[in-house]
Amino acid sequence: MIPGIRGTRDILPAEVGRWRRVEGVARDLCARYGYAELRTPVIEREELFAKGTGESTDIVQKEMYAFTDKGGDRITLRPEATPSMVRSFVEHALEQELPCAKLYSLGPMFRYERPQKGRYRQFHQLDVEVFGITDPAVDAEVIEMASALVAELGIETAELVINSVGCDACRPRFSQALIDALGERVAELCGDCQRRSVTNPLRIFDCKVPADQPIIDQLPQSEDFLCDACRDHFAEVRRQLDAYGLSYRVSHRLVRGLDYYTRTTFEMLGTNLGAQNALLGGGRYDHLVKQLGGPDRPGIGFAAGLERLVLALPEGAGEIDVADAFVVALGDPSWSAARILARDLRRAGLTTLIDYEGRSSKSQMKRANRSRARHMLILGEDELASNQVTVKTMETGEQQTVTRADLVAHLRAVGTD
Ligand code: HAM
C-alpha cells in the first residue's frame, strides 16, 4: 500500500455530507451578498506570493510548495487565494465587467506546516474579496457576512475579534515605538521574534512562545498610534458592527500573519477547536492591487478554513444521502426487467440502487437493508406477469403492491427526500 502524503486527507464518503453542507451554505451566502464566483489555478508563479503575501511571512519563508518546472520557471502551489484573486482581477480587468467587484472562490491551498488537528498541508478555503471600496461600510458588511456564515452553519461557539493595524502613514511610527520599547530586551525573545524585530516588528504580536509573553504584554498598543484617518475608519467600522448587533472583542494583538493588511483586521475563533482555533481571518489591504501591477484600488476580504468549519459543525449536520429505492430481482428472469425499472426510476429523478453478479434474493435483501434505502422494490415472476412492483417501506416494514404506471407517483407521495 502506498499511503497518502502527511498533512493531506481523503474526505471520505461518510464525511462528504458535512462538506457539502459547508460548501452549500458558503455558495448560497456569497450569492445573497452579491459575490460572483472566480476560479483560479492551483499553481501560480512563486513571485506572486513573494510580492503579495510578503517576503517576511512564515508562509513565504518556510511553507511554500515551490519548485522549478520542466521549462525552468519558478512555480508554487498556492498557499492562499488573495494574491491569485488580485492577479486575476487585474489580468482580466474585471472591474470593467462587474457591477461591483465582489468575488469569491472555493478550493484547496497548500502550506508546508506541522500537521495537527485543524492544521493540514493541503486544506480548503472559502475566499471572499471586494475590490475598489474604501467606505468602512464594506468592512462592516464583510465582517457581518463572515459572522453570518458561522451562524448559518449552526456554529454557536465562535468569537469575533477585530483590530486596526493602521496604514503606511502611521504604522512606521508604531513599529519604531515597538523597537524602542523592546530596547535591549529583544535579545531575550525567541529567534523568530528577533528576526521579526528586524523584518516586521508588528509580527511579534503573533508569537505564541510562553516565555516571550510577559515582554510582549508590556509593549505599546497599535490603537495609540493610529493616525486620525485610521482612527476614524476604525471607529466607524465598530459603530456599524454595533448597529448590526454583533458582539466582538478588540484585540491589539490581532496583527495577522500576512504582510498586505492595512487598517481593519479580524478573525473568528472557534471556542472548542483546540490550538488551531481560527475559523476564518481577513482584513483590508489597500495597496496590494497596485503592488501587484494593477490600478490603485483598495481591497478587503477574508478566508475561512473549510476543514475547521466542518470540525465545528454541530453533530448530525449534513447527513449522507440515502437512496430512495433498492430494486431486488427475485429469480433470474427478473434481472433484466429490474435493471430497466432502475433505469426508469433514475431517469424520473429517484436515487436508485440495484445489485450485480446475479446474487440470491436473500443476499440482495441484506444489501438493501445495509444501504439504508427508503424502499425496497421487489420484482418477481408474479409482479412481472401483472406489471406490478411490491414496495416495502423499510422504516415501517409495510408492504404493498403498486402498478408500474403508478410507481413513481407512489414513491414521491410516501416521501423520497
Ligand atoms: P489566513 O489567516 O492565513 O488568511 O487563513 C485563513 C483561514 O484558513 C484560517 O483562519 C484557517 O481557518 C484556514 N487555514 C489556514 N492555514 C490552514 C492550515 N494549514 N490548515 C487548515 N486550515 C488553515 C488568508 O489566507 C488570507 N488570504 C485571508 C484574506 C482574504 N485576507 C484578505 N482576503
Image (cartoon, helix red, strand yellow):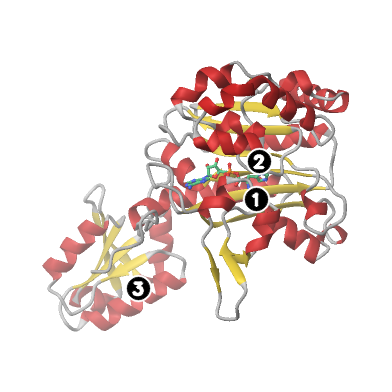
Quadrant location of the N terminus? bottom left
Query: How far apart are the alpha carbons under marks 3 and 1?
Result: 58 Å
Q: Is residue 108 above or below residue 388?
A: above
- Where, by quadrant of the figure, is residue 48 drawn? bottom right
Q: Is residue 148 above or below residue 14?
A: above
Residue located 40% across and 70% down the image: 345
**N-terminal of the two: label 3 or label 2?**
2
For the residue carrying disc 2, how many other residues have a C-alpha within 10 Å: few (<14), some (14-19), or many (20+)? few
Which mark is drawn over residue 342? 3
Q: Ligand 1 within 8 A of label 2's CB?
A: no
Left or right for 241, reference 358:
right
Which amino acid lies under the numbered mark 2 shown in the image of this protein?
A: Thr
Q: Position of residue 339 (x, y in %)?
A: 31, 78
Query: How far apart are the alpha carbons under marks 1 and 2?
Result: 9 Å
- Where, by quadrant of the figure, is residue 242 drawn? top right
**N-terminal of the two: label 3 or label 1?**
1
Q: Is residue 15 visible?
A: yes
SS assignment at label 1? loop
SS assignment at label 2? helix
The answer to the question of whether label 1 and label 2 lie on touching residues, with beta carbons closer than 8 A, is: yes
Q: Position of residue 392 (x, y in %)?
A: 25, 58
Query: How far apart are the alpha carbons under marks 3 and 2?
Result: 65 Å
Which amino acid lies under the numbered mark 3 shown in the image of this protein?
A: Ala
Q: Position of residue 106 (x, y in %)?
A: 58, 55
Residue indicated by mark 1: 55
- Which of discs 3 and 1 lies nearer the camera? The answer is 1
Residue located 78% across and 25% down the image: 234
Q: Is residue 248 visible?
A: no
Left or right for 225, reference 343:
right
Which amino acid lies under the numbered mark 1 shown in the image of this protein?
A: Glu
Residue indicated by mark 2: 199
Left or right for 284, reference 273:
right
